[in-house]
Amino acid sequence: MNTENPGGVGGRAPAAPDTLSEEMREVIAYYDELAPKYDTERFGGSYGAYLDGLERPALREWIQGPRVLDLACGTGRFLDLASEGLDLSEKMVERAREKWPGKPIHHAPAWSIPAAEGSYDTLFALHVFMHLHLGDISRVLNECRRVLRRGGVMIFDFPNALRRRLVRYEATGWHAGTELTAGSLRLLGGGHWRLTASRGLALAPVHRLPHAARPAFMAAEVLLGRTPLKHLASYQMVKLEKVD
């Protein structure tokens, strides 16, 4: 269930910090079961190709340096852009290792990355923060700050709170249950990050577009997602730079 607090962050109350909550275990079980069919069901059709076509150009533009960690790699959709992967779903990790046998892929939570301080130039996490409680998002950002070098960048996406208000959408349960605004990231980041870039994703109601029309709309959205219209998109994708 989404709520709104005085800081402008829509989301759920923090989860217990030291153990996996029942809800987090439910998330893991969901993705463990989905792993064998994830690629075909989520990204094998025109809708998945549409999302990939919006996300991939931004990642290619924003990623910097040779040490790059995909923080919730799933079955490895973006591991061509990363040097390492990590995921909390054991079954997802197994699939990713099959597809990318030459890359280190860690089975671990995003708030406990098995790496030394300052190990990475870039971290990215797509389709992740939307499933996390606000306390867990803060923990992840703190851990990312630990393992990033000074000046390193963190890239992630989240459901746009403004768009959800405009269309009167209310999430139920954990799936995409947390919404944010770009401004609220300052609260979660604790002043340790600088917002250097943002994009809007899925301005158009993709599910309602005819399949044949989606490629043309995708090309237009790649451009429109850079304009002020990005603030009306379904999702925001941001690039944060570690400042201390």
Image: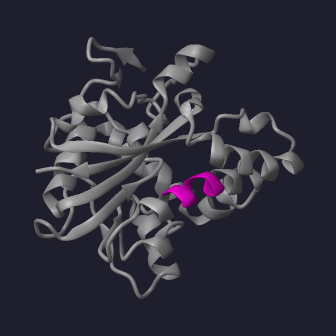
Q: Position of residue 101 (x, y in %)?
A: 44, 86
Q: Is residue 138 above or below residue 72?
A: above
Q: Depth check: give the residue in front, 98 or 111.
A: 111
Q: Is residue 173 above or below residue 104?
A: above
Q: Is residue 81 magenta?
A: no
Q: Which residues are magenta?
A: 52-58
Residue beneath the point at 41% across and 88% down: 102
The quadrant of the rendering that contains the N terminus is top left
Left or right, residue 162 beside residue 142: right
Outermost residue on the front side: it is 227
Going 37% across and 52% down the picture, which residue do you hit?
155
Q: Quadrant of residue 147?
A: bottom left
Q: Quadrant of residue 43?
A: bottom right
Helix, strand or loop: magenta stretch: helix
Is residue 101 shown left or right of residue 243?
right
Q: Name the residue: 24% across, 32% down.
A: 186
